[in-house]
Image: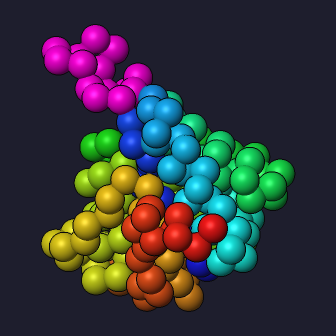
Amino acid sequence: MELYILRHGIAETAPNPPSGGDSKRRLTAEGADKMRRAARGMVALELTFDLIISSPFPRAKETAEIVADVIRGGKRIEVSALLEPGKNSKDFIEELKRKHGDKTQVLIVGHEPGLSRLISVLISGDTRTSIELKKGALCKLTAGTLEYGRCAVLEWLLTSRQLRRLE
């Protein structure tokens, strides 16, 4: 299975104190524009996805929608509450394996630090591997058999800027 892990684009600043909080933040106009350009970089890389899974938070869903639109794969976006900040990556991996173990190319759109921890667990077996996944960055992992623990190889990690340069 090829897992593509994408951090959402640039989002609105969190209100202080949060009213509706972090879960309501949307992409900024700049964030949406940069994500469209990064998605065109994905097209230049000839990426396709059998499935797109997103956090339910607006900034992640908007990021997933932009990618789905630009890639024109006509893929439906599945929302998983297990990609919300603070959720356990083990539960997400088990859900992914159970529901979508037959998929070969899956795009996962979510938040930090959860995505870095997910990558770390899959490539090293624990969450301590230091990975910087900036907004709009895309990582590719390849896993023979998906499981919680060391099961994947890090193929590459591109920043949003690097993706935009490919368009």
Q: Is residue 22 above or below residue 133?
A: above
The quadrant where residue 124 appears: bottom left
Reply above or below: 68 against 100: above
Residue 106 at x, y = what percent?
62, 66
Mark yes or no: residue 47 visible: no
**Secondary structure that dominates the magenta span:** loop
Which of the 4 quarters of the picture holds residue 159? bottom left
Place of residue 46 in the rendered image (x, y in percent of width and height, measured from the top left): 72, 76
- Residue 119: x and y in percent read 36, 71
Which color scheme is applied? rainbow
For the residue pair 163 and 121, the one nearer the viewer reads as 163
Residue 135, visible in the rendered structure: yes
Q: Quick check: is 49 in the magenta stretch? A: no
Q: Is residue 99 above or below residue 131?
A: above
Give the residue displayed 25% in from the left and 71% down from the top. Answer: 131
Which image quadrant for residue 77?
A: top right
Q: Is residue 63 left or right of residue 66?
A: left
Taking the spot 28% from the left edge, 80% from the top edge, the residue there is: 125
Q: For the point 74% across and 48% down, which residue is it?
A: 69
* Magenta segment: 12-25
Q: Residue at x 16, y 15 (%)?
A: 17
**In the picture, which quadrant includes the C terminus?**
bottom right
Q: Is residue 153 left or right of residue 87?
A: right
Quadrant holding the N terminus: bottom right
